[in-house]
Image (tube, helix red, strand yellow):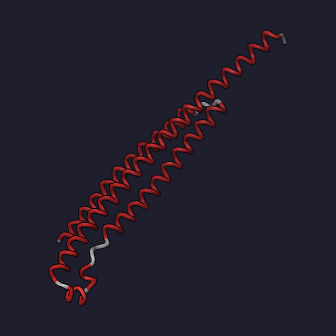
Amino acid sequence: MDVQSLITEVTGRAEKIAAQGQEVATIGFDTLKTANSIVIESASTIAKINADAATALYSGAKVSFEKASKDGVQAVIAKPVSYLPATGPAVDAFNSTVKTLLDTKGELVKTFEGGYSTIVATLNGEATVAKAKKTVKAAVAKTETAATKAVKSATKTVKAASKKVSA
């Protein structure tokens, strides 16, 4: 083996490793970007759910206070439980938050597993990179759909609870 062929072989391997490193960096960044969008979507969903619950609780407490002020101290002492605001919105918000967090965890696990398998496939030179990218994109789409459904469901629940409080 002469020096020229050795240099050519080393250069070829170095270029291959550099290309793989670039691909791994790109895949890692895309995976983190996807995970970030999942977390942001979930955080905004949770914030909306809890803000709606806080609004419903505040309006319920306001109605209860006005009722207690109108009825007087003696009526409140006689039946204090009847002047407490409904706790349904807080319980519903808690349950929705837990469900959203569990769904987020599942989607993040799928996203990171997909990113990891894509990186491994890239380093091994396998042709499954496109398949792993599809998995990550499908996980993102599924997360967006689930988050949208959770927001709609929570909104309906809070509106129904606030109607009950108002009535």
Between 29 and 110, the one nearer to me in the picture: 29
Q: Is residue 16 left or right of residue 2?
A: left
Residue ID at (43%, 43%)? 37
Between 162 and 107, the one nearer to me in the picture: 162
Q: In this view, does 148 lie to the left or right of 28?
A: left
Picture quadrant of residue 19: top right
Picture quadrant of residue 61: bottom left
Residue 29 pos. (x, y %):
53, 35
Residue 141 pos. (x, y %):
41, 43
Asked if residue 123 is positioned above or below residue 39 in the image, the reply reads above
Indicate the quadrant containing the N terminus: top left, top right, bottom left or bottom right.
Answer: top right
Asked if residue 116 is positioned above or below residue 66 in the image, the reply reads above
Indicate the quadrant containing the C terminus: top left, top right, bottom left or bottom right.
Answer: bottom left
Residue ID at (45%, 54%)? 103
Residue 123 pos. (x, y %):
65, 32
Q: In this view, does 26 lie to the left or right of 163?
A: right
Residue 25 pos. (x, y %):
58, 32
Residue ID at (46%, 39%)? 137
Picture quadrant of residue 119: top right
Asked if residue 13 is positioned above or below residue 128 in the image, the reply reads above
* Figure label count: 0
Asked if residue 23 is positioned above or below residue 107 in the image, the reply reads above
Residue ID at (78%, 9%)? 4
Residue at the outermost left position: 70
